Amino acid sequence: MNAPALSDQELIRDYLNGRESSLETIVLRHKDKLYSYIYNMVKCHQTADDIFQDAFIKVIHTLKSGNYNEEGKFIHWVTRIAHNLIIDHFRRSSRIPIQTNQKDQDPFAKVLLPTPSIEDILIEEQILKEIKLLVEELPEDQKQVLKMRHYMGLSFKEIAEQTDVSINTALGRMRYAIINLRKFASEKNLILSK
């Protein structure tokens, strides 16, 4: 009678205690599911292979540095690592063109996606999430005008009336908000446009 298979947590503990074969066992256990997930996103075997390997390199570094926490399932953790690597891959390859016409163009400009694929949707969601975080760093008056314009859909006349400023002041705050967003994005090396 065969001994019961070790859990992922037990294999990780064995690996951290020096048994290298435990990592191989856990990789083989989750290989098909993780590789399928990556391939379905990138649609290229070579890229999927690279991301799969990079994901497990990150796993090894995290385990060896003692930063792994066993709160969730191992497969969910490694899939999240792969997911982030997929987003990085598409961001680096600039496969998401953003309409650009002017220097001070609004970073909320429409993203040009001929046929949205899963990776396009993931990248667009990530970009919007990053923009929302940057918006929170704006001075209060700029943040207010930007939110009223983009989230509430108000005209500059309505914004001016509600904030008790002139239309020119509202326009100026919006312009500075966009300039500051681009500056913040540049400082954090975020790619919000092509």
Image (cartoon, rainbow, N blue to C red):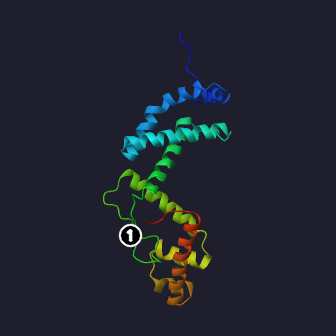
The answer to whether residue 191 is above or below residue 167 is above
Residue 125 versus residue 62: which sits nearer the camera?
Answer: 62
- Counting from the top left corner in percent of width and height, residue 146 is at 52, 75
Q: Residue furthest left?
A: 114
The answer to whether residue 151 is above or below residue 159 is above
- Counting from the top left corner in percent of width and height, residue 91 is at 46, 56
The answer to whether residue 90 is above or below residue 65 is below
Q: Residue furthest top?
A: 1
- Report the residue at 58% width, 63% height from top: 188
- Report the residue at 31% width, 60% height from top: 114
Identify the image quadrant of residue 100.
bottom left
- Counting from the top left corner in percent of width and height, residue 104 is at 47, 78
Looking at the image, can residue 70 be seen?
A: no
Looking at the image, can residue 110 be seen?
A: yes
Residue 55 versus residue 120: which sits nearer the camera?
Answer: 55
Q: Amino acid at mark 1?
A: Gln
The image quadrant where one finds the C terminus is bottom left
Q: Is residue 78 left or right of residue 100?
A: right
The answer to whether residue 166 is above or below residue 12 is below
- Counting from the top left corner in percent of width and height, residue 149 is at 48, 76
Residue 80 versus residue 88: which sits nearer the camera?
Answer: 88
Q: Which residue is tagged 1? A: 99
Residue 147 versus residue 12: which sits nearer the camera?
Answer: 12
- Report the residue at 56% width, 88% height from top: 164
